[in-house]
């Protein structure tokens, strides 16, 4: 009995594997078509449509939640394949504090099926201290050394999303390294937005007790640098995470 059932499973697998490989190959061809015709690689409406067709076509709903989960994953893998084909680089997010790098980064990673690395979090893990404490007890120069070490430790990371702290790219060595490892996407932001997003959080040592005018001076100083090294720029003010994500994916696969 068990042997017979297992034999049936093997037969299902043979069909699934062949169909799945064919489906992913077609997804890859779709990527080329979309790029050639200026269409967005990430089309949430089309994906919702695919998912609802799949669920709608199920006569027996016993496993519908499981099939829905599996399909969501297949769709994510298709996206990953499409993106890797059109953009086989790391997505490196740069920009001022509060521009959304650490918020949007995980979302871009999830949507594109990529891994996410947050340089600030890696620094805190390496030091066993928060960034605030590192700045307060050991100073900024020490923090920058850790930052450079963490960035260098990402040397084997590929096809991933990396969020850098706002000051990481003030260092020429970091810039050279990151440019070799990926494309730099500058999340641009106004002082007003930074103030609204971070004004009360107060956990950025360089922004402690700063007013909008101070933030403006700092942003103006930094923006020339961001602009000079960025491969792409996305304005993030007033944009929900999903929109920044969609804008980013469409910009880099155009
Ligand atoms: C810094 C930005 C911070 C953090 C540190 C210094 C900077 O990261 O690395 O407080 O110099 O701009 P976020 O840009 O993620 O806030």
Image (cartoon, rainbow, N blue to C red):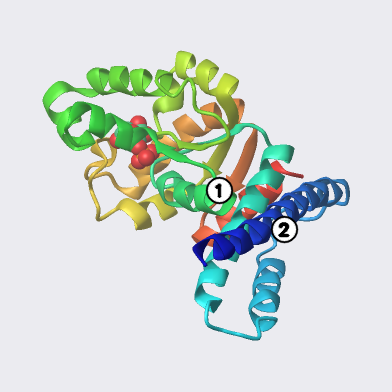
- Can you see residue 239? no
Question: Which residue corresponds to the image point at 51% horizontal and 47% vertical from the top-left?
Answer: 109
The residue that label 1 is drawn on is: 113
Observer-nearest of 66 and 237: 66
- Can you see residue 241? yes
Pinpoint residue 97: horizontal percent, then vertical percent: 39, 42
Real-space CA distance between mark 2 and mark 1, rounded to the nearest whole angstrom:
25 Å
Q: How many marks?
A: 2
Pinpoint residue 217: horizontal percent, then vertical percent: 41, 37
Question: Which residue corresponds to the image point at 53% horizontal and 26% vertical from the top-left?
Answer: 225
Pinpoint residue 10: horizontal percent, then vertical percent: 62, 56
| Element under disc 1 | loop
Observer-nearest of 53 and 189: 53
Observer-nearest of 229 and 103: 103
Quadrant holding the C terminus:
top right
Q: Nearer the viewer, mark 2 or mark 1?
A: 2
Q: Are marks 2 and 1 in contact (CB under 8 Å)?
A: no
The residue that label 2 is drawn on is: 15
Mark 2 within 8 Å of ligand 1, using the beta carbon: no
User: Residue most toward the front?
Assistant: 1
Mark 1 within 8 Å of ligand 1, using the beta carbon: no
């Amino acid at each position: 009995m068990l042997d017979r059932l297992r034999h049936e499973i093997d037969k299902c697998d043979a069909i699934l594997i062949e169909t799945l490989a064919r489906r992913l190959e077609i997804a890859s061809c779709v990527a080329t078509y979309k790029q050639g015709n200026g269409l967005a690689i990430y089309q949430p409406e089309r994906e919702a449509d695919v998912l609802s067709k799949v669920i709608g076509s199920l006569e027996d709903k016993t496993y519908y939640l499981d099939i829905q989960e599996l399909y969501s994953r297949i769709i994510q893998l298709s996206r990953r394949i499409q993106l890797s084909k059109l953009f086989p680089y790391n997505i490196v997010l740069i920009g001022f504090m509060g521009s959304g790098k650490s918020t949007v980064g995980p979302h871009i990673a999830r949507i594109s099926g990529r891994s996410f690395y947050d340089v600030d979090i890696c620094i805190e893990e390496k030091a066993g201290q928060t960034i605030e404490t590192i700045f307060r007890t050991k100073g900024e120069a020490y923090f920058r050394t850790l930052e450079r070490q963490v960035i260098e430790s990402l040397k084997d990371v590929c096809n991933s999303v990396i969020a850098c702290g706002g000051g990481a790219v003030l260092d020429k060595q970091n810039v050279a390294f990151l440019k070799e490892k990926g494309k730099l996407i500058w999340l641009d932001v106004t002082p007003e937005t930074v103030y609204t997003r971070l004004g009360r959080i107060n956990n950025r040592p360089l922004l402690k007790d700063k007013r909008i005018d101070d933030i403006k001076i700092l942003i103006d100083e930094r923006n020339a640098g961001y602009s000079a090294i960025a491969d792409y720029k996305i304005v993030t003010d007033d944009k929900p995470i999903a929109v920044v994500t969609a804008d980013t994916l469409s910009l880099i696969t155009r």
